[in-house]
Image: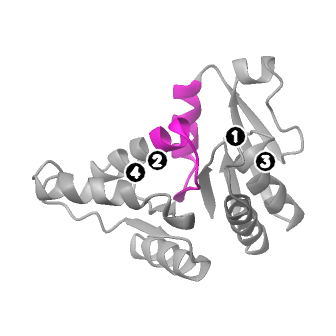
Amino acid sequence: MNITVFAGSAPGSRPEYIEAAKTLGKWIGENGHTLIYGDGKVGMMGAVANAALQAGGKVIGIIPEFMIERGWENRNVSEMIVTKDMSERKLKMAEMSDAFIALPGGYGTLEEIADVISWVRIGLYDAPCILYNTLGIYDKLRELYAEMDEAEFLGEEKADFILYSDDMKEIEEFIKKKVTDKQ
């Protein structure tokens, strides 16, 4: 299974964030899945990729040209795909994925998972979306989506393709159920 992980290039202020990235990467590698991510070598991105590789997993990094020019790429990946810009990168990641997971991150991570949630919601993709909720980092986003739903901005469709969790067993079961349901 191809699992796209959106993650920050910073490590965050708490060691639990990096540990979450390592736990996820290790799980991806040990379970024979392929990690698809933005090809960064530092922070949360580097931690998830390195853990997946160390656990024997395949890692596909997708990176825009300008990031290579700045030396931000991870050359240790199994495969590197170079795109012309961030938009092409995000589309390529979405096209290749069976599931999406957002680790804690910044503006870019939030933008990426929000786009994917929107695309799944309107039927462009059919995949589970998980917000890896380390230390409750995505609790306010969950509250915001609940407010938007209550205000009737999100329509009648159920958002049952979204999971907020930091429990790998729960995440694994959610992905299996959602991917099996669509087959």
* Residue 113 vertical position relative to residue 131 in the rendered view, above or below: above
Earlier sequence position, callout 2 versus callout 3 = 3
The residue wearing badge 2 is 113
- Type of the residue with mark 4: Tyr
> What distance separates the C-alpha of mark 3 from that of mark 4?
27 Å
The residue wearing badge 3 is 46
The residue wearing badge 4 is 125
> What distance separates the C-alpha of mark 1 from that of mark 2?
15 Å
Check whether the beta carbons of the residues at disc 2 and disc 3 lie within 8 A of each other.
Answer: no
Q: Which residues are magenta?
A: 86-112
> What distance separates the C-alpha of mark 2 from that of mark 3?
18 Å
Q: Nearer the viewer, residue 76 or 110?
A: 110
> What distance separates the C-alpha of mark 4 from that of mark 2?
13 Å
The residue wearing badge 1 is 9
- Type of the residue with mark 3: Gly
Earlier sequence position, callout 1 versus callout 3 = 1
Q: Residue at x 63, y 19 (%)?
A: 84
